[in-house]
Image (spheres, rainbow, N blue to C red):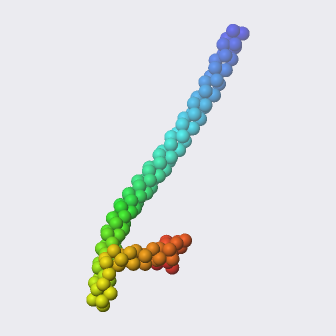
């Protein structure tokens, strides 16, 4: 009987051990399910962040296109201003000729260039981005 009781006790101990292990397995499965849920939540957040990044990149691209358009417009404006300056130089030279103060075109051009330099010097040190300087 002693042998039987000992075998029975070992079987009960092993059954208790198995129950504990099965309990830990269930706990581990619960943890794994929670981790998978967290991973799914994190994945959703990553997708939202990627969507925001894509939208921001689209905005950046649009801004860059606007910058390029603005730079082209600035270049065109510079050409137009150059033509206006040359036209004004010719008109001024012609007016002087009509008024009897005929002078060489180089002198008239130098006069216009001097006016331009004086204007640039008067603005030196000013922040041209300020609306008050425009």
Can the viewer see residue 84 in this picture?
no
Q: Position of residue 66 (x, y in %)?
A: 37, 64
- Could you say where residue 117 lies in the image, as x and y percent from the top left? 45, 74
Q: Is residue 102 left or right of residue 114?
A: left
The number of discs equals 0
- Which of the 4 image quarters holds residue 1? top right
Q: Is residue 29 visible?
A: yes
* Residue placed most toward the observer, 27 or 85: 85
Nearer to me, 87 or 114: 114
Q: Where on the picture, by quarter, is residue 96?
A: bottom left
Q: Give whichever of 79, 72 is nearer the camera.
A: 79
Is 54 left, or right, of 121 in this rendering? left
Residue 48: percent from left, percent from top? 45, 53
What residue sits 65% from the left and 24% below the top? 16
Give the residue drawn at x 61%, y 24%: 18
In the image, residue 73 above or below residue 52: below
* Vertical placement of residue 105 versus 2, above or below: below
Residue 101's quadrant in the figure? bottom left
Q: Residue furthest bottom?
A: 99
**What residue is rendered at 29% in x and 79% in y?**
90
Name the spot of residue 80 as percent of width and height, x first.
31, 73
Q: Is residue 60 above or below residue 82?
A: above
Which residue is found at the position 38% from the left and 75% from the top? 110
Please, is residue 63 above or below residue 53 in the view?
below
């Amino acid at each position: 009987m002693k042998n039987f009781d000992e075998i029975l006790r070992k079987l009960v101990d092993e059954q208790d051990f198995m129950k504990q292990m099965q309990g830990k397995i269930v706990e581990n499965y619960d943890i794994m399910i929670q981790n998978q849920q967290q991973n799914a939540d994190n994945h959703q957040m990553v997708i939202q962040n990627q969507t925001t990044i894509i939208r921001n990149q689209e905005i950046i691209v649009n801004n860059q296109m606007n910058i390029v358009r603005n730079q082209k417009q600035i270049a065109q404006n510079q050409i137009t201003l150059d033509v206006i300056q040359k036209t004004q130089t010719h008109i001024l030279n012609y007016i002087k000729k009509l008024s009897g103060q005929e002078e060489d075109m180089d002198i008239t051009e130098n006069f216009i260039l001097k006016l331009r330099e004086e204007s640039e010097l008067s603005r030196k040190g000013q922040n041209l981005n300020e609306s008050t300087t425009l």
